[in-house]
Image (cartoon, helix red, strand yellow):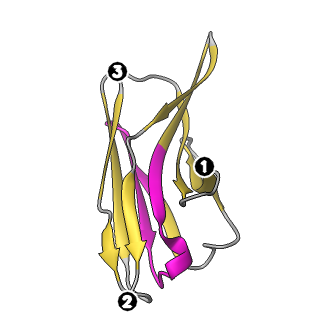
């Protein structure tokens, strides 16, 4: 059974930093990308950042986090990280790790359980 285990969330003051981690356990194959999404109360889940799993990595960021957040990854066991700097109250949300696998059945999305990030003074 594939599990994505997130850690690193918490309470931080505006301007502070946090580093989120996500490690994949279980047998997972053909992972093409990993990323982070977030969902604030009363809002839809939105993309934060993604990174491709390839010889040449490509990253993609939401406009709201560009220049403040950095996504990175490690080789198998698959792991992805999100360094968050200059945090703002509007970054408060539950952050979810995502892994995308592409196989003969098509695209399969795996999700973590979520980790709470609260930015408040």
Front residue of this view, candidates 11 and 71: 11
Residue 58 x, y percent position in the rendering: 63, 53
Image quarter of the N terminus = top left
At 30% from the left and 24% from the top, the residue drawn is 26
Q: In which image quadrant can residue 68 be found?
A: bottom right
Residue 48 horizontal side relative to residue 7, left or right: right
Residue 27: mark in rendering: 3
User: Badge 1: how crowded within 10 Å, few (<14), some, or many (20+)?
Assistant: few
- Asked whether residue 58 is in view, the answer is no
- The span shown in magenta is 72-97
Q: Secondary structure at mark 2?
A: loop
> Marks 2 and 1: which is nearer the front?
2
Spatial CA distance of label 2 from label 1 is 40 Å
Residue at the disc numbered 2: 121
Establish if 71 lies above or below 114: below
Q: Is residue 78 magenta?
A: yes
Q: Is there CB contact under 8 Å for labels 2 and 1?
A: no
Residue at the disc numbered 1: 56
Establish if 19 lies above or below 72: below
> Marks 3 and 1: which is nearer the front?
3
At 44% from the left and 62% from the top, the residue drawn is 82
> Marks 2 and 3: which is nearer the front?
2
Spatial CA distance of label 3 from label 1 is 24 Å
Q: Is there CB contact under 8 Å for labels 2 and 3?
A: no
At 63% from the left and 57% from the top, the residue drawn is 43
Establish if 66 lies above or below 22: below
User: Badge 2: how crowded within 10 Å, few (<14), some, or many (20+)?
Assistant: few
- Asked whether residue 80 is in view, the answer is yes
Residue 103 x, y percent position in the rendering: 59, 16
Residue 83 horizontal side relative to residue 50, left or right: left
Residue 67 x, y percent position in the rendering: 60, 79
């Amino acid at each position: 059974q594939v599990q994505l285990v997130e850690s690193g969330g918490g309470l931080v003051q505006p301007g502070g930093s946090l580093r989120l981690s996500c490690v994949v356990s279980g047998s997972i194959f053909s992972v093409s990308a990993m990323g982070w999404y977030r969902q604030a109360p009363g809002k839809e889940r939105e993309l934060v950042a993604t990174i491709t799993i390839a010889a040449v990595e490509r990253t993609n960021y939401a406009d709201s986090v560009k220049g403040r957040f950095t996504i990175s990854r490690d080789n198998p066991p698959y792991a992805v990280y999100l360094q968050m700097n200059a945090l703002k109250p509007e970054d408060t949300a539950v952050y979810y790790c995502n892994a995308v696998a592409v196989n003969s059945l098509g695209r399969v999305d795996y999700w973590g359980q979520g980790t709470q990030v609260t930015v408040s003074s």
